Image (spheres, rainbow, N blue to C red):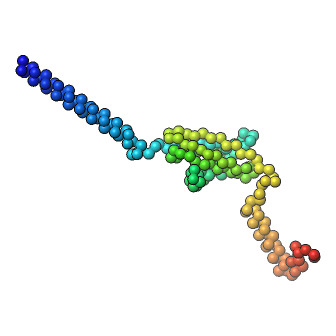
Amino acid sequence: MGAEETRHDLWLKRINTWIGILGGSVASIAGAYNFLPSFFPPAPGDIAAVVREQGGAPVPRAHVELLTSQNVLLGTAETDRDGRYVKKDLEPGSYILKVSRAAFEPQVAKVSVASKKTTDLELVLRFRSRAQAPPSPQAASTSQAQGNAIRSAVEETGAAWIKNLGKPGR
């Protein structure tokens, strides 16, 4: 009987050892799971936007600015010919999307990006009325420079009377 008790004791020791190994492994895995977010950042997400005009037609070559929620510019791009804009691999969080195109009122949207998800967005641009449309800075400076060049050329040729054209009382 003594030999059987020894075998029995041997089996109990083996079982206890395996229980200890399995228990330690489970505890290690649970501990690693609790620290997982600090070791591995969350997976990135994406933004997929479509820019359309009020009639539903896509707006190609619209200027798109992507900013953080603190208004820090992350990048610029243009929509493709179908009015699509895609930005991949963004950290989860809040962003600002600014879209503009000549003849349209600019549009601003707040976007929330989630881990491993694509945030779909549709932006509708409204036509700008002619009264609201400011002249582009480039066009204004070009016409002003052309006017000054012509005026200077005429004055140099001896037409001094042109200097007084814009003055009241003459």
Residue at 20% across / 26% down in the picture? 15
Viewer-side residue, 130 vs 14: 14
Quadrant in which residue 85 is drawn: top right
**Residue 71 seen in this snapshot:** yes
Total number of numbered labels? 0
Viewer-side residue, 160 vs 91: 91
Residue 92, placed above or below residue 18: below
Horizontally, is 44 left or right of 52 in the view?
Answer: left
Residue 109: give x, y in percent of width and height.
Answer: 64, 46
Horizontally, is 75 left or right of 144 in the view?
Answer: left
Residue 156, placed above or below residue 36: below
Viewer-side residue, 35 vs 134: 35
Residue at 18% across / 28% down in the picture? 14
Residue projecting furthest to the left: 2
Residue 24: give x, y in percent of width and height.
Answer: 27, 35
**Residue 62 seen in this snapshot:** no
Residue projecting furthest to the top: 1
Residue 96: give x, y in percent of width and height.
Answer: 60, 49
Residue 23: give x, y in percent of width and height.
Answer: 27, 32
Q: Quadrant of the N terminus?
A: top left
Residue at 24% across / 29% down in the picture? 19
Residue at 79% across / 53% down in the picture? 132
Q: Quadrant of the C terminus?
A: bottom right
Horizontally, is 105 left or right of 87 in the view?
Answer: right
Horizontally, is 34 left or right of 88 in the view?
Answer: left
